[in-house]
């Protein structure tokens, strides 16, 4: 299944790995292995370190992030997943990477944005989407992984400000951040209903075990 030319499934020692075409050959961002295939260098994408890789391994059917996509990424942290998204969108795409925590944002800037022209760090709080002065125009995809109890509301507010009509959102739901006492499936279903109320169509819901026990992923579009 080729979601994009920059995403490839590679067998290493009999095991199938998801990988992305390295936009910065020779550079490993978080210690991931670099492998050569057909004269190109790919970075193995660790599903235990990145929920998007976990979702691909669990069968995400329609990967909305493609070559040339404009992505608003909320909760960039040190840039582990952002770096793979940067590989996928390539030099014709752009990733606006929002992260308010200065300690991790420094790593995002030094290890990822300084080497990848398509990553724009936005050192802001996703609760204030109108304060992102470096985000221009509308985006194709909003990706939200901020592990906050009101993450769905924050994601919806960012989509209202920046998602183009027909655009997609990937929302990571940290069920424990929302309600530790409830069944995780019920929490994910509750967040999906909020999205439907806000006008989204739910495309797919995935649980990320065994890669991540706490999270579900909702893929939806307007
Ligand atoms: N998405 C990252 C990855 O896969 O490499 C991991 C993200 S980590 C689970 C959650 C991040 O969300 C943290 O870096 C945290 O600082 C950030 N965060 C928390 N609240 C936020 C907010 N209100 N706005 C933007 N980011 C936030």
Image (cartoon, rainbow, N blue to C red):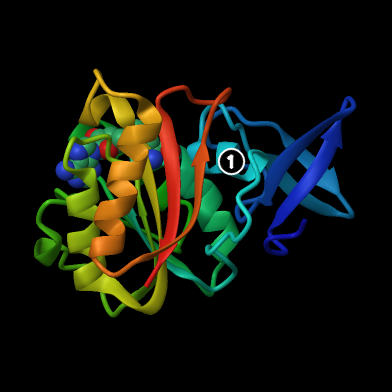
Looking at the picture, does residue 60 appear above or below residue 130?
Answer: above
Residue at the (66%, 39%) spot, across then down:
57
Coordinates of residue 4 in the picture (x, y in percent) = 68, 63
- Quarter occupied by the C terminus: bottom left
Ligand 1 within 8 Å of disc 1? The answer is no
Looking at the picture, does residue 128 appear above or below residue 52?
Answer: below
Q: Is residue 135 in view?
A: no
* Image position of 39 (left or right of 88): right
- Quarter occupied by the N terminus: bottom right
Residue extending furthest toward the top: 181
Q: Nearer the viewer, residue 68 or 65?
A: 65
**Based on the displayed image, in which of its 4 quarters is residue 109 positioned?**
top left
Q: Is residue 31 in view?
A: yes
Coordinates of residue 12 in the picture (x, y in percent) = 85, 31
The image quadrant in which ligand 1 is located:
top left
Residue at the (37%, 28%) spot, across then down:
184
Residue at the (23%, 65%) spot, across then down:
198
Coordinates of residue 107 in the picture (x, y in percent) = 35, 36
* Image position of 203 (left or right of 4): left
Looking at the picture, does residue 47 appear above or below residue 155?
Answer: above
Coordinates of residue 75 in the picture (x, y in percent) = 30, 43
Q: Nearer the viewer, residue 33 or 3?
A: 3
User: How would you rate the neighbour count of disc 1 (Cα within 10 Å): few for under 14, some for 14-19, many for 20 or more?
Assistant: many
Residue at the (28%, 70%) spot, across then down:
199
**Based on the displayed image, in which of its 4 quarters is residue 175 positioned?**
top left
Q: Which residue is mark 1?
A: 53
Question: How many labels sit on residues?
Answer: 1
């Amino acid at each position: 299944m080729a979601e994009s030319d920059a995403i490839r499934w590679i067998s290493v020692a009999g095991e199938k790995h998801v990988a992305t075409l390295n936009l910065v050959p020779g550079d490993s961002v978080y210690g991931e292995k670099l492998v050569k295939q057909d004269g190109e260098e790919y970075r193995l994408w660790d599903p235990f370190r990145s929920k998007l890789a976990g979702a691909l391994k669990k069968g995400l059917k329609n990967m909305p992030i493609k070559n040339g996509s404009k992505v608003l990424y909320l909760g960039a942290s040190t840039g582990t997943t952002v770096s793979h998204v940067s590989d996928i969108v390539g030099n014709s795409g752009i990733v606006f990477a929002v992260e308010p925590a200065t300690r991790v944002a420094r790593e995002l800037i030094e290890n990822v944005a300084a080497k990848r022209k398509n990553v724009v760090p936005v050192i802001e709080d996703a609760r204030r989407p109108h304060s992102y002065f470096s985000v221009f125009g509308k985006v194709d995809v909003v990706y939200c992984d901020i592990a906050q109890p009101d993450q769905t509301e924050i994601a919806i507010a960012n989509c209202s400000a920046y998602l183009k009509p027909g655009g997609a959102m990937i929302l990571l739901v940290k069920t424990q951040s929302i309600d530790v006492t409830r069944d995780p499936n019920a929490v994910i279903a509750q967040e999906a209903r909020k999205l439907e109320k806000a006008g989204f169509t739910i495309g797919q819901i995935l649980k990320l075990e065994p890669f991540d026990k706490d999270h579900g992923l909702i893929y939806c579009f307007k």
